């Protein structure tokens, strides 16, 4: 049985450089996964409103989105290795400043700076994995890489579940996990420097959105769901009188199963119609909020909703990025990937900002209904586009 699974996933077909990329991605996810969980819980305990928390987290996403406009200049001036190392160092300083000056203005400014630096690295890494893969292995490669970073994100909340969010010790953990990324990058320096990323055009071309509207709308909604869940699910559960440790375990549970599903999702992506796969994942994004809303009937519904969120959330990014790589010419792939991430981050920016404010007025119901509305709009447009595809040149 194990050999059948191994043959299906076929890790050997994944480009070697993607495996080194995944090492860096894992430690990036570990540091950020813990930080984002702890910062939201601490902010909630300090009586920050959901709207304030949403706007603070949105600043990180706004920074990520803004990175697309400067990434080519930074990489062209100092190269990939120095960019990654500098970004990690400055992000660590930002985390320290946030815990020293824990107020909305400090959190917002430092989230924005961290977002810009993370965005530069992220756009480069996503381009990296797409460029070194072909259509036969792209889904597996992206699934492997996505699993690495999400494994880190999953372990972050698990640490919150084990150690809680109160006192000095969680802050020390947060800073340590940010610092440890530097020696990791230094160790794999030669592998980073051997990668030849195609030059990213200085001028972004948003015409890709017109060419492939469903891909970009789907990933926009993916951004809304991902960021809103990460920023506001802890607040949602605190409102339901769950503890910080319980929230940490729930987040780990969803992310863990999302992670272990990715090699299979990636392999499946290489074999079936990617567009139809995206529809399925969007439908799951309609189902899990409904289950969460009704968890009081049975705690099993709560765990199931988090499980479905983890699998659908991570898989939607894997499948849409693979679909983009399949449909876009290799010469244009780097710039298309930058636009892809900008659109995704636009969703991550708007999601917590809007849904957090809705929660201020409508409570936890605002969280559920807002996510359903965003996802339903994406599905509706996708269905309309499917009927119109034969009469247009769209994707």
Image: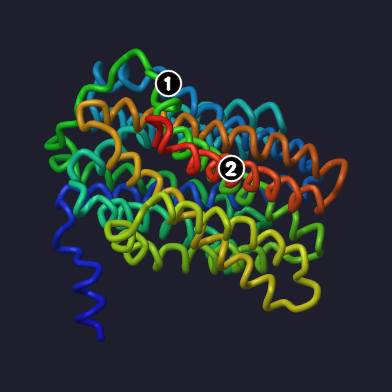
Task: Please indicate, yes or no, whether residue 296 appears anywhere in the rendered image.
Answer: yes
Image height of 372 relative to 119, above or below? below
| N-term mark: 2 or 1 | 1
Q: Which residue is painted at 41% across and 49% down in the image?
A: 275
* Marking on residue 84: none
What colouring method underlies this structural image? rainbow
Q: Position of residue 319 (x, y in %)?
A: 39, 51
Q: Quadrant of the N terminus?
A: bottom left
The answer to the question of whether label 2 and label 1 lie on touching residues, with beta carbons closer than 8 A, is: no
Q: Which residue is painted at 49% across and 31% down in the image?
A: 343
The residue lying toward the viewer, choosing from 329 and 58, is 329
In the image: residue 67, left or right of residue 354: left
Q: CA distance from mark 2 to mark 1?
A: 19 Å
Q: Position of residue 231 (x, y in %)?
A: 64, 46
Instruction: Rate crowding at label 2 as few (under 14), some (14 to 19) or many (20 or more) other CA atoms within 10 Å.
Output: many
Classify mark 1: helix, strand or loop: loop
Q: Position of residue 75 (x, y in %)?
A: 27, 22
**Residue identifier under label 2:** 378
The residue lying toward the viewer, choosing from 275 and 135, is 275
Q: Which residue is painted at 78% across and 41% down in the image?
A: 48
Task: Please indicate, yes or no, whether residue 173 appears anywhere in the rendered image.
Answer: no
**Residue identifier under label 1:** 206
Q: Nearer the viewer, mark 2 or mark 1?
A: 2
**Which residue occupies the extreme front position in the image?**
391
Q: Quadrant of the C terminus?
A: top left
Image height of 87 relative to 289, above or below? above
Q: Position of residue 218 (x, y in %)?
A: 51, 42
């Amino acid at each position: 049985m194990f050999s059948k699974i191994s043959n299906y996933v076929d890790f050997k077909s994944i480009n070697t450089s993607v495996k080194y990329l995944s090492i860096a991605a894992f430690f990036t996810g570990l540091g950020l996964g813990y930080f984002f969980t702890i910062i939201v819980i601490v902010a909630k305990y300090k009586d920050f409103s959901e709207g304030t928390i949403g706007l603070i987290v949105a600043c990180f996403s706004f920074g990520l989105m803004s990175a697309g406009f400067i990434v080519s200049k930074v990489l062209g001036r100092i190269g990939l290795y120095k960019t990654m190392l500098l970004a990690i160092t400055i992000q660590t300083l930002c985390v320290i400043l946030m815990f020293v000056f824990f107020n909305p203005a400090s959190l917002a400014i430092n989230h924005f700076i961290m977002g810009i630096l993370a965005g530069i690295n992220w756009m480069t890494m996503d381009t990296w994995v797409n460029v070194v893969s072909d259509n036969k292995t792209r889904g597996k490669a992206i699934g492997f890489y996505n699993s690495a970073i999400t494994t880190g994100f999953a372990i972050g909340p698990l640490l919150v579940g084990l150690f809680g969010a109160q006192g000095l010790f969680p802050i020390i953990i947060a800073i340590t996990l940010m610092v440890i990324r530097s020696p990791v990058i230094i160790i794999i320096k030669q592998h980073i420097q051997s990668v030849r990323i195609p030059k990213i055009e200085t001028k972004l071309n948003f015409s890709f959105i017109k060419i492939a509207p469903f891909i970009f709308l789907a990933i926009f909604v993916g951004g809304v769901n991902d960021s809103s869940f990460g920023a506001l699910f802890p607040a949602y559960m605190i409102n339901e009188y769950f503890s910080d440790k319980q929230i940490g375990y729930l987040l780990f549970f969803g992310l863990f199963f999302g992670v272990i599903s990715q090699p299979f999702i990636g392999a499946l992506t290489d074999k079936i119609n990617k567009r139809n796969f995206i529809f399925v994942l969007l439908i799951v994004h309609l189902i899990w909020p409904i289950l969460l809303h009704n968890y009081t009937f049975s705690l099993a519904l709560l765990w199931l909703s988090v499980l479905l969120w983890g699998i659908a959330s991570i898989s939607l990014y894997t499948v849409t990025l693979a679909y983009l790589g399949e449909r876009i010419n290799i010469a244009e792939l780097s710039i298309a990937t930058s636009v892809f991430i900008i659109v995704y981050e636009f969703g991550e920016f708007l999601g917590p900002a809007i849904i957090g404010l809705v929660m201020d007025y409508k409570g936890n119901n605002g969280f559920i209904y807002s996510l359903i509305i965003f996802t339903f709009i994406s599905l509706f447009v996708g269905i309309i586009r499917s009927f119109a595809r034969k009469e247009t040149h769209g994707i």
